[in-house]
Image: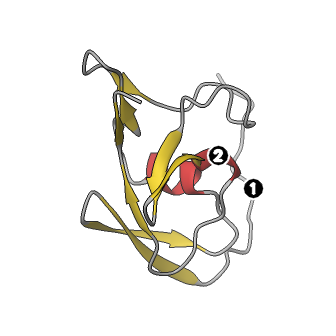
Amino acid sequence: MSKAQRLETKRGRELKFTFEGETVTAFEGETLATALLAAGVAAFSLTRTGEPRLPFCNMGTCFDCAVCVDGRFLVRACLTDVREGMQVNRQEGK
């Protein structure tokens, strides 16, 4: 039996952004990686051969969570706070 327990926490205000054109709901103070994982996104980007990529280190060193935010490529989702209205897309083969 696990000794892990969920702690009560106060969440920030609700925010909405898009990922691949679909609306995602997140909370102020969350990182983009957290919001995308919570939304069930299965691939933040794709390799040159089409394999899915997801956060690996979740601390900004590996770039496996890199996405395109508002037209800027190689934005690390694990280091980027969610903002209202941001447009996020996968990176493919970069």
Label 2 element class: helix
Report the amino acid beneath label 2.
Cys
Q: Which residue is at the front of the view, 47 or 23? A: 47
Which x, y percent locates residue 48? 31, 19
Q: Residues within 10 Å of mark 1 (few under 14, many from 20)?
A: few
Q: Which residue is at the front of the view, 66 or 6? A: 66
> Where 72 sits versus 45, above or below?
below
Q: Which mark is residue 36?
A: none
Which residue position holds label 2? 78
* Residue 46 location, quadrant: top left
Q: Quadrant of the C terminus?
A: top left
Residue at 64%, 57% (x, y): give it: 31
Report the amino acid beneath label 1.
Leu
Does residue 44 appear left or right of residue 50 in this picture? Answer: right
**Which sits earlier in the primary sequence, circle 1 or circle 2?**
1
Q: Which residue is at the front of the view, 55 or 75? A: 75
* Residue 62 location, quadrant: top right
> Where 47 sits versus 85, above or below?
above
Label 1 element class: loop
Residue at 50%, 79% (x, y): give it: 15
Which x, y percent locates residue 42? 34, 36
Residue at 67%, 79% (x, y): give it: 12
Q: Quadrant of the N terminus?
A: top right
Residue at 69%, 50% (x, y): give it: 6
* Residue 19 location, quadrant: bottom left
Which x, y percent locates residue 11? 67, 74
Q: Which mark is residue 7?
A: 1
Q: Are marks 1 and 2 in contact (CB under 8 Å)?
A: no
Does residue 92 appear left or right of residue 11 in this picture? Answer: left
Q: How is the image coloured?
A: secondary structure
